[in-house]
Amino acid sequence: MNNERSVIHETFVIERKYQAAPAKVFSAWSDPELKSAWFPKADSFEFKVGGREVNAGGPPDGPVFTFDAVYQEIAENERIVYTYTLDQGGSRMSISVVSVQFQASGQGTRLIYTEHGAFLDGLDTVSMREHGTRIMLDKLGEVVAE
């Protein structure tokens, strides 16, 4: 185990265009049933300012990852801002601030996902986080297209 402490600050932005109205894409974030179709199912989900979303899980016989988010700002069908921690077992991997913007674009939605992260002790990297987020946002596109 690496005992050296480090913090690496990184930001990434992902834009997606979905062929669904902003209200539909927003609801895929705000409705726990819809969200569980593209994001790990929450153990608790309280979509309101100050509310929390928590899920813990991982591969069979693998480490448990815990996502613990607090919603900081919500503008219905326009914007969600939240902070979250990601832990692996008992180790904190990262602390992030995320904004998700939903903009009308023709008959669809332009989604802008921005994450500012403090990645701790070499347990995660911005490239791994961005890769995983891209996969989830692609899955979101499939969900809202149905």
Image: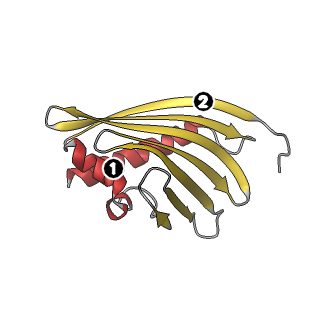
Q: Residue furthest right?
A: 3
Q: Quadrant of residue 58?
A: bottom right
In the rendered view of the protein, which quadrant contains the C terminus? Answer: bottom left
* Circle 1: residue type: Leu
Residue at position x 61%, y 49% in the image: 85
* Circle 2: residue type: Glu
Crowd tier of the residue under label 2, counting other residues whose Cα lies within 10 Å: few below 14, some 14–19, many 20 or above: some
- The residue beneath circle 1 is 140
Q: Which label number is shown at residue 10?
A: 2
Secondary element under disc 1, as helix, strand or loop, is: helix
Q: Residue furthest left?
A: 107
> Is residue 74 depicted above or below 126 in this figure?
below
Left or right for 139, reference 105: right
Q: Of residues 1 and 117, which is closer to you in this image?
A: 117
Residue 109: image location, x then y, percent: 24, 37
Residue at position x 49%, y 45% in the image: 132
Q: Of residues 74 and 93, which is closer to you in this image?
A: 74
Secondary element under disc 2, as helix, strand or loop, is: strand
Left or right for 129, reference 63: left
Q: Count of labels shown?
A: 2
Residue 41: image location, x then y, percent: 45, 64
- Distance Cα–Cα, label 2 vs label 1: 24 Å
Residue 57: image location, x then y, percent: 56, 65
Residue at position x 33%, y 50% in the image: 140
Residue at position x 15%, y 32% in the image: 106
Residue 82: image location, x then y, percent: 49, 44
Of the numbered discs 2 and 1, the one sitting upstream in the chain is 2
> Is residue 134 depicted above or below 13 in this figure?
below
